[in-house]
Amino acid sequence: DTAVSQTPKYLVTQMGNDKSIKCEQNLGHDTMYWYKQDSKKFLKIMFSYNNKELIINETVPNRFSPKSPDKAHLNLHINSLELGDSAVYFCASSQDSTRFRGYTFGSGTRLTVV
Amino acid sequence: GDSVTQMEGPVTLSEEAFLTINCTYTATGYPSLFWYVQYPGEGLQLLLKATKADDKGSNKGFEATYRKETTSFHLEKGSVQVSDSAVYFCAPLPTNGQNFVFGPGTRLSVLP
């Protein structure tokens, strides 16, 4: 059983398109995250949701919009894709901060904008 | 703000060599400390952790000791294998419970 699953694994799309990445966790965790990893492997937090509520929204373009229909799912929608959006996007989950034991990461979605 | 400094990679070693990857941090309060590993084409996996001063985290032959006096959490392994080739990330969890700080990652390549 995959603990944190993301789809798709690879996404190639043209500039200006709108795309979504889906994430689901079956660990019963309360908190989910989106991270962006650039070509130099730097990881940057984008969003964090706790029980469907947005708790962290770092400085990312408003073309990026997370949606959490329930605490097991956190999707990422990106409008008007740009070349600079090319990166690997990781979903992660954890227990809430009072019971934090570390993140569980998905395997990533490699987005290539051409 | 909170930050992490890791030794710059890439680190290239021969099989069975000794490994050290340095990590120092600044964080609010008294954080728990984690090392994550990312194998090629995969997501990050928790490798080991330590939650208080002088604790030693260990897993898969890797060890790291929480040194509060030097705010460090260096990763070591006595004899690396080709399968250890990956990127290693150091990450402190600040006491405010918001773990959003990862080190820049250190790429390790182990040659047969």
Image: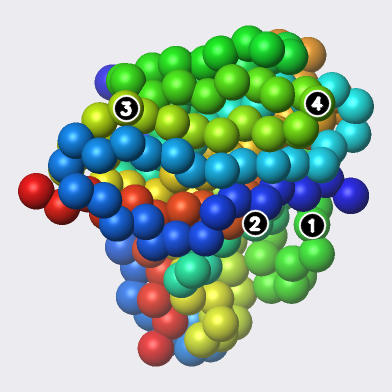
Q: Amino acid at mark 1?
A: Glu
Q: Tag 1 or tag 2, which sits nearer the N-term?
A: 2
Dot label at residue A44? 2
Compared across the picture, whether A23 is left or right of A50 comes to: left
Q: Chain of mark 2?
A: A
Q: Which residue is mark 4?
A: B69
Q: Chain of mark 3?
A: B
Q: Which residue is mark 1?
A: A58
Please report contact status of discs 1 and 4: CB closer than 8 Å, yes or no. no
Residue B101 appears in the picture as rendered: no
Q: Tag 4 or tag 3, which sits nearer the N-term?
A: 4
From mark 3 to mark 4, how far is it between C-alphas? 24 Å
Residue positioned 73% across, 14% down in the render:
B53
Do discs 2 and 1 share a chain? Answer: yes
From mark 2 to mark 1, how far is it between C-alphas? 9 Å
Q: Amino acid at mark 2?
A: Lys
Please report contact status of discs 2 and 1: CB closer than 8 Å, yes or no. yes
Q: Amino acid at mark 3?
A: Gly
As helix, strand or loop, the secondary structure at mark 4 comes to loop
Residue positioned 15% across, 52% down in the render:
B111
